[in-house]
Amino acid sequence: MSTIIDRALAGKFVLIAEIGVNYYDIATKFDISLMDAAKLMIKEAKDAGIHAVKFQSYKAGTLAAKASPSYWDTTEEPTTSQYELFQKFDHFGEAEYRELKDFCDKLGIEFLSTAFDLASADYLDSMMDVYKISSSDLNNLPFVEYQARKGKPMLISVGASNEDEITRTLSLVRSVNDQSIALLHCVLEYPTPYEHANLNKITSLKKSYAEDPIYADKNGSPILIGYSDHTKPDTCADVIKTAYNLGAVIIEKHFTLDKTLKGNDHYHAMDPDDARNILKGIAFIDTLRGSYDLKCLDSEASARSNARRSIVTTCDIKKGAILTPEMLTYKRPGTGIPPEKMNEIIGRTMAVDVKEDTILQEGMLS
């Protein structure tokens, strides 16, 4: 079972650390092997409370033509060819990812990796409980269908996509796969300026797809909504908290152990302290949200009793007297007969003598 999907279906926040290929630079920084660096990042993610880690499985030759230009901030990552960049980070294959999967299982954190070719989609099948479709492959319908036919839940990023493209891809997936689907808002701009985050799109995705029953899974559960974030971490985690408040229960964000490292995805990634800050902020939001029940809270019982009013006498009244409107008013506390029963009380007979300013109780009437 997928921790990501199980938590999201239960309405619980999910944080995915997109390690991607950042472990290459971490290995260089600490002078350790690639495998040790990847495992170190997994452990740091687990210690920070993150729910899942995600890698990227590709070979440069199957992903990009040699003439593929860059689309990232070259002041942060100076490589101007996609092919050349991906060549730097494509050393891991099936055996290495299997070792990372086993390490994740040992620590108790979910493992997944975005497949970028048929070979990786196949060998990752036995390692993952959920498939992730990159925004870059949203219109790669043959590849999307190939993964969808694996019959597992799917996370689908929709960066740089128009509504008709999202609908077309989602409809294709649903035609061959009845498992849970999560649509992740995403902006393909690295890093994403805050003014380009466009988080209202989360609301639109929710309205267009999560509220449409034709996209529900085999159990009738609606499309899940998430956010794959490429903004630089802000001090108060307001980007992530806003996304969550708008309906994104699954958050995927690049992860590093050193945000000052040049190159690749460090400059817009969260580090373990950022992750802890995010999780702490979300926990506080959940505390504030409370319940959807339309009822008096247990914590309000005392205030309810004392701040509401009761029917109170305006004068001394003798036993046997018939109550008239002039004899009655309403004052705090609400420990007597409530004012809503005023019309029922008028015309009744007093069973005892009472003084002015007495809070009427049902036992005082006959």
Image (cartoon, rainbow, N blue to C red):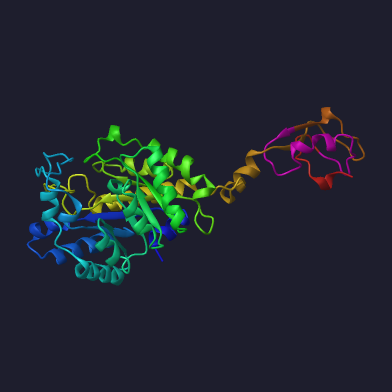
Q: Position of residue 157 (x, y in %)?
A: 34, 47
The answer to whether residue 225 shows anywhere in this view is: no
Examine the structure image and report whether residue 338 is included in the region drawn in magenta.
yes
Examine the rendered structure and indicate whether residue 194 appears above or below residue 181.
above
The answer to whether residue 168 shows anywhere in this view is: yes
Q: Which residue does the image show at 15% across and 48% down from the upper left?
A: 65
Magenta residues, start to end: 330-354
Q: Quadrant of residue 22?
A: bottom left
Answer with left or right where residue 228 lies relative to residue 293. Answer: left
Q: Position of residue 159 (x, y in %)?
A: 31, 42
Answer with left or right where residue 198 lies relative to residue 32. Answer: right
Q: Quadrant of residue 72?
A: top left
Examine the rendered structure and indicate whether residue 260 appears above or below residue 97.
above
Examine the rendered structure and indicate whether residue 48 appears above or below residue 161.
below
Q: Which residue does the image show at 17% across and 49% down from the upper left?
A: 64
Examine the rendered structure and indicate whether residue 266 appears above or below residue 127.
above
Examine the structure image and report whether residue 351 is included in the region drawn in magenta.
yes
Q: Main secondary structure of the magenta part?
A: loop
